[in-house]
Amino acid sequence: MKTNLKAVLTGTHTLSGNEACIEGAFAAGCLFLAAYPIMPAIETIERYLKRSAEVGATFIQMEDEISALAAVIGASWTGKKSMTATSGPGFSNMMEHLGLGVMLETPCVIIDVQRTGPSLGIPNRAGQADMMQARWGSHGDYEVITLAPGSPQEMFDFTIKAFNFSEKYRTPVIVISDEYIAHKKEKVVIPPADGIKITPRRYFKGQKDKYLPFKRDKDFVPRMVDIGDGFKFHVTGLTHDDKGYPIMLEECQEYNVHPILWKIRNHVDEIVEFQETGTVDAEIVIVYYGATSEAAIKAMKQAKDMGIKVGGLKLDVVWPFPDKKIAELAEKVKAFVVPEINYGQIVSEVERCSYGNANVIFVSHGEKGINNTDDIVSAIKLALKEKERKKGIIEYRSQAGSS
Amino acid sequence: MRYWEVPFGKEKPKTPIGEIHILKERCKGCGFCVEYCPKDVLEMSDEFNSKGYHPPKIVNGEACVNCGLCETICPEFSIWCTLKEEVALEN
Amino acid sequence: MEPLKMIEKDIQPMDVHPMNDILRMDRLPHIWCPGCGIGTAVTAFAAGLDKANIDLKKTCIVSGIGCTGRVAGYIKLDSFHTTHGRGIAFATGIKVANPDLKVIVFSGDGDLISIGGNHFIHAARRNVNMLVICINNFIYAMTGGQVAPTTPLAAYATTSPFGCVEPPFNIPYLADSSGAVYVARWTALHVRRLTNSIAEALNKPGFSVIEVISPCAMYYSRINRLGDGLDMMKFYHDNSEIRHGEDTKNLDIGFQTKIIVGKFVDRERPTYMDSYNKWLSGTKKAEK
């Protein structure tokens, strides 16, 4: 694949998370965006439009989020890397086509800039309450890859990664950021175009009459073709066989859905990424992701200064969840401290994966909307005090609202 | 047609004669082709296909002029006609 | 776990139908009931494709759900069977991403006008270059005969046991007022005119809508005691009137009233891609 040099703004920039995300998309070769304006994801669309003419990318503002993701899936079948950007309420709308994207095995990227909820919530306040929706929001059995960047630089890097994952596994990939990262301006270093690793689309190379849209390789990932190449394929959201024809049989349901799940489950070790800091001899491990990273890293430093053996585990890829890593750490450490900007989502996964071997302390976000460093430090102290193994999640309520 | 209106050397108009093909197994016996055949070539038969429907049968095959209406109106893609021959008009 | 073996139907193409190249003969017989008009519309569509003289390689068809949603699966083009009402949105994505393609949306009234109504009017407003064929059978047929947004007043359905109380949509009027460039209505009986209309609309740039009134023998006719598919066809024969260029306001369909058919709108408007490219070239000039 030829890299469009204009698409990669090599150099050092000061960009907000939303802007960095679009730069990442262009660097990954994204050529189509369909979206519906929503706070706080709007800067992505604006940035895209600003740059689309010079990059040669296409944009359409659809009438709602449902049609935005539908258009993205349609566009992806024409051979263009496609994406959409939205926030909580729009993300709820998109659940319908997240399922379609999984069933049609269409590579595409969804940027979810989280705000609070339920329903409209506060449009301009960060939240992390869509984490479970990203995993379980659409009906039926599916697996999804979700990346959670924690800074504008990661926003850039993870968007490229998201496109690579989506092409490699032929599945929709979600980049789940939040209002805090989206609007935070920071230094973003964009490497030269040849230094960016891009996974090209995995096309079918063979005779036209032998093409089966869902014929799988050993890795369960079928090969794609574009509309207009003359393959005359059929794909459907119904349970289908290799030809893409709907078949309403129980065994076909199994035949169809099993590889969709296992093409991701078999590659969990390749997909899952995390950043460990000082977990080797840690007593307490802070598990964090996204916007809480900053507070968690600060708290880690403070606790270390106090002489507490504390480590950190930043989840880069939230879904699939790093079950093995958490289970491995749970046997060594005393407790996990999980700060989140919600009332407990990923913490329940941590609790599930610790199999009762370690205490799990959840730090809620308090009044200020984002996790407080002092709260996390206090939670660490609480974890040290706790001598017994407690069942379930121990909730640490924020004492003060300031940071 | 009056002969002086016909340009010299022009071929005489011909009547196409069609041949009807019926896939009885695909038929669901809706009767559209029987009802709307302009030459009344078809009729519902008494026999059953394996699905239990009565497919049409050809009763007046010579009358078919290969108009193709049965082919287009058939919802089951089970009937079509092909051109058999073209016969010059008499007179 | 190893995947199961591929499940294939044991249906062999029995003979060579003239539309063998356009239809997926390995999938026949289709799922539609005896006396249903969708098959007729599909045949007319296949004939229209043939007549329109377009590159079938560069043509794709998108369907929503329901009885008519299955059409895409029977037509040998790049075909997509998508979710409820989103056929037009999906097709918009395809068309905008690759303007060289010819895009056809073939779906039903419930799919396009009810759940996909928003996408329908917005695609018409934008004038995205596509052909929308809307089969109108006045009812939700696949779910078992519920009220549709096109069910005429006083007609019975399983969810209107005392007669439909909601006024129906007039699809040509909706399309016309939203900005479609080509609007026609035919019944499943008018196969020749429908074929010609499809061929004409396929070569027309812009958002074209063809409504096809189609008998639903199993639900609409049965619940309303209107006989079978053939009786409905006879009704169309006696009660449809061709009025080309008729004002789309006058095209309401009542319960068993006269059906006005014909080509109502045929006009020129810049398509979405025209306007988009104009904007794009303007931006590029400004940069220089």
Image (tube, coloured by chain):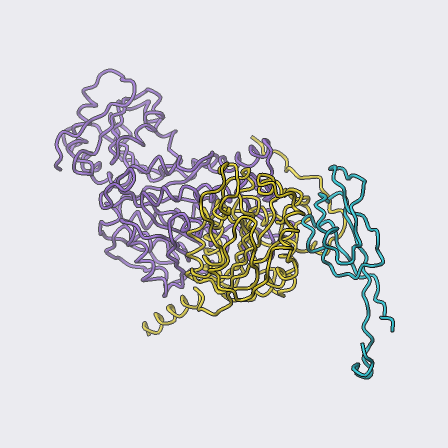
- Residue A236 lies left or right of residue B76; in this view the side is left
Quarter occupied by the N terminus of chain B: bottom right
Residue at the outermost right position: B91
- Residue nearer the viewer, C202 or A112: C202
Examine the rendering and report whether any part of residue A219 can be seen. Answer: no
Q: Give the chain ID for the cyan colour.
A: B
Examine the rendering and report whether any part of residue A329 can be seen. Answer: yes
Relative vertical location of residue A33 with respect to residue A401 in this rendering, above or below: below
Relative vertical location of residue C24 with respect to residue C191 in this rendering, above or below: above
Q: Position of residue A97 (x, y in %)?
A: 44, 44
Q: Position of residue A334 (x, y in %)?
A: 26, 22
- Residue nearer the viewer, C48 or C211: C211
Q: Position of residue A162 (x, y in %)?
A: 39, 46
Quarter occupied by the C terminus of chain B: bottom right
Q: Give the chain ID for the purple colour.
A: A
Relative vertical location of residue A380 with respect to residue A241 in this rendering, above or below: above
- Residue nearer the viewer, C96 or A14: C96
- Residue nearer the viewer, B72 or A370: B72
- Residue A232 lies left or right of residue A315; in this view the side is right
- Residue A110 lies left or right of residue A304; in this view the side is right
Q: Position of residue A390 (x, y in %)?
A: 27, 17
Q: Quadrant of residue C45?
A: bottom right
- Residue C49 lies left or right of residue A318; in this view the side is right
Q: Give the chain ID for the yellow colour.
A: C
Residue at the spot 32% in from the left edge and 72% down from the top edge:
C287
Counting the numbered discs, the total is: 0
